[in-house]
Image (cartoon, coloured by chain):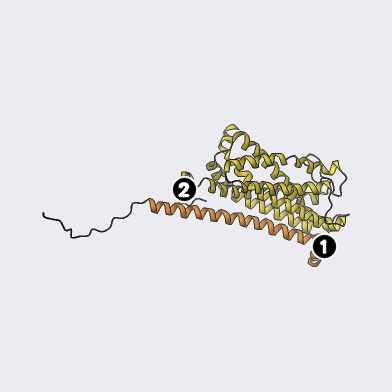
Amino acid sequence: MWQFFHKLGSPKWFYGIATRFMPWLLASGLLLLVAGIVWGLAFAPKDYLQGNSYRIIFIHVPAAFLAQSIYIMMAFSAVVTLVWRMKLADVFVKAVAPVGLVFTFLSLFTGAVWGKPTWGTWWVWDARLTSMLILLFLYGGVIALDRAINDEKSAARAVAVLVLVGVVNIPIIKYSVDWWNTLHQPATFKLTEKPSMAMEMWVPLVLAILGLYLLFGWLACLRMKTEILIREQRTRWVRDLVLAGGK
Amino acid sequence: MAFDSFSAFLVMEGHGPYVWVCYGVFVLLLAGMMFWSFRTHQDIYQICKRGYEQQSKVGQPKPKAPATFTRVEVSQD
């Protein structure tokens, strides 16, 4: 375990392993996501209450899952950055923050469009929607802070502190539908409980969620590799790798 | 299939515009982000490669100029 942890701290080791896994992540991610979306759009039955507008769930829930999961992963990386000063942890935060921003925007956008036929309004200032909007601002703040500080180490520390302060928002997002009265429906998908929806709807949703997680894995590896190239371009191993034509 | 025809699939009993706008924006942003990330990686890789190739050229010893004969005036005093 500790050996793996130490290996993970090596940009060279990570670059090699990421290059090897990336084609598998991309192929399996695309396959599962397309399967989940096609199944959900064309073959899953209509919802008895919401009609066909509920089909937005097959992208809304995966995007919202990713938006929160990415922030939790960033918080773990922030701890590693502050405690162990591991370079790759900071590389991860910098590489995935824009991805988290896009997924948060997607969950807000698809939620707003879904809200119009379901609730009769695009937006309400209730706890779930507002806390997701705060998550969007947190991602924006992390990206802006990182770009505002020139010194790499100072930027890494400042960003890690901001990420850790913002992590308090994650349980608020999760439990907002239980703690406050809200238009937003309770959690559709729980890992610990039996699904509250029909299996014909639940299976494509799971496929779409898994597919999007795998695609996120591909995106994270690719963006981390780019960041590693920028930071380590003066090292011999990057020079040897690039001159040898290795991607 | 959950729909009787392809047009029913597109219209989705009036919910089509909401559903298709969401899926359109989702695919556009996801594909755009993937393409942009891939392109940025390729660009950075090429910049590094060009830099290393230039360094290699600069680091190599310059080829010597061909030998020339020059008359040198030397004083016999």
- Which residue is located at x 82 percent, y 46 percent? A127
Q: Nearer the viewer, residue A202 or A143?
A: A143
Chain that is yellow in the image = A
Chain ID at mark 2: A
**Residue behind mark 2:** A239
Residue sitting at the far top: A2
Q: Colour of chain B?
A: orange
| Residue B62 position by quadrant | bottom left
Q: Nearer the viewer, residue A59 or B3?
A: A59
Q: Amino acid at mark 1?
A: Met
- The secondary structure type at the circle numbered 1 is helix
Q: Is residue B63 above or below residue A166?
A: below
Residue A74: image x %, image y %? 67, 42
- The secondary structure type at the circle numbered 2 is helix
Q: Amino acid at mark 2?
A: Arg
Which quarter of the figure is the N terminus of chain B placed in? bottom right
Q: Nearer the viewer, residue A188 or A107?
A: A107
Q: How many marks?
A: 2
- Which residue is located at x 86 percent, y 47 percent? A182
Residue A193: image x %, image y %? 81, 40
- Which of pointers 1 and 2 indicates the residue nearer the eye? 2
Q: Is the residue marked by circle 1 packed among few (<14), some (14-19), or many (20+) residues within 10 Å? A: many
**Residue behind mark 1:** B12
Residue A189: image x %, image y %? 79, 45
Residue A52 is marked as none
Residue A209: image x %, image y %? 73, 49
Residue sitting at the far bottom: B7
Horizontal relation, residue A96 to residue A172: left or right: left
